[in-house]
Each structure stands twice: as structure tokens, then as C-alpha cells.
Image (cartoon, helix red, strand yellow):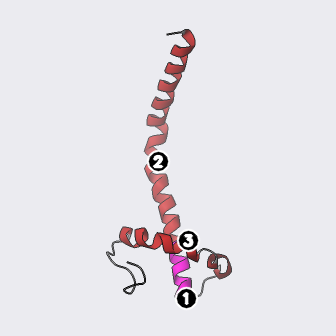
Amino acid sequence: MSVLGRIGSGWRRLERAHDAVFVARWRRGLRREARREQDVLRALVLLESLGVDNPVAYETLDLLPYLVADVHAWHQRMGAERFGDPGVCC
């Protein structure tokens, strides 16, 4: 193996060790926070579609088609096996 190959291999090992020590421990928390933000957005859009006043109603109206695709995973994560009337969601 050439000197450059050994340096590259050592660098990759160093990057993996850095990721394991500094990045991996925060990854779960970052995913949880992103999921929480998505849940808040879904709840706002859903409440708006049910007629509850929303201060950002105009902007969330464009998001309704995207919400339909996410409702199933969202309500399962919230603990409900079924959501909505028959034929509406699950």
C-alpha cells in the first residue's frame, strides 16, 4: 500500500472515530426535534382543515396535499391505530 493510501485509510478511520464520539450522540436528539417540529406543522394544518382558526392559514393551505401523505405515519406514532372516518384515512 502506498503512503497516500495509508494516509487516506488513516483519515477515514479518524473521521469514523470523530463521528462516533461527537456526532452520533446528538443524532437521536436532532431527529426527535425534527419529528416534533413536523408534528406541530401537521397539527396546525390538520386543525386548519377542520375549521380551527390558524394565524398562518394562507401559507398552510398549500401544504394540504403533502399532509395527506404523512397522516398515516403521524397518527401511528401518536399511538392511534386508526384515524378518521372509514375511507378518509386508514
Callout 1: SS: loop
Specify the label residue 27 is tagged with.
Answer: 2
Q: Is residue 25 magenta?
A: no
Name the image quarter holding residue 74. Answer: bottom left
Q: First in sequence, mark 3 or 1: give its number.
A: 1
The residue drawn where x is 43% and y is 51% is 28
Mark pair 3, 1: CA separation = 19 Å
Disc 2 crowd rating (10 Å Cα; few below 14, some 14-19, many 20+) is few
Residue on which the image places disc 3: 66
Task: Specify the amino acid type for callout 3.
Answer: Tyr
Residue 36: image location, x then y, percent: 48, 64
Depth check, mark 2 against mark 3: the one in front is: 3
The residue drawn where x is 44% and y is 35% is 20
Q: Magenta stretch: give its range.
A: 41-51
| Closest to the observer, 59 or 90 | 90
Mark pair 2, 1: CA separation = 35 Å
Residue on which the image places disc 1: 52
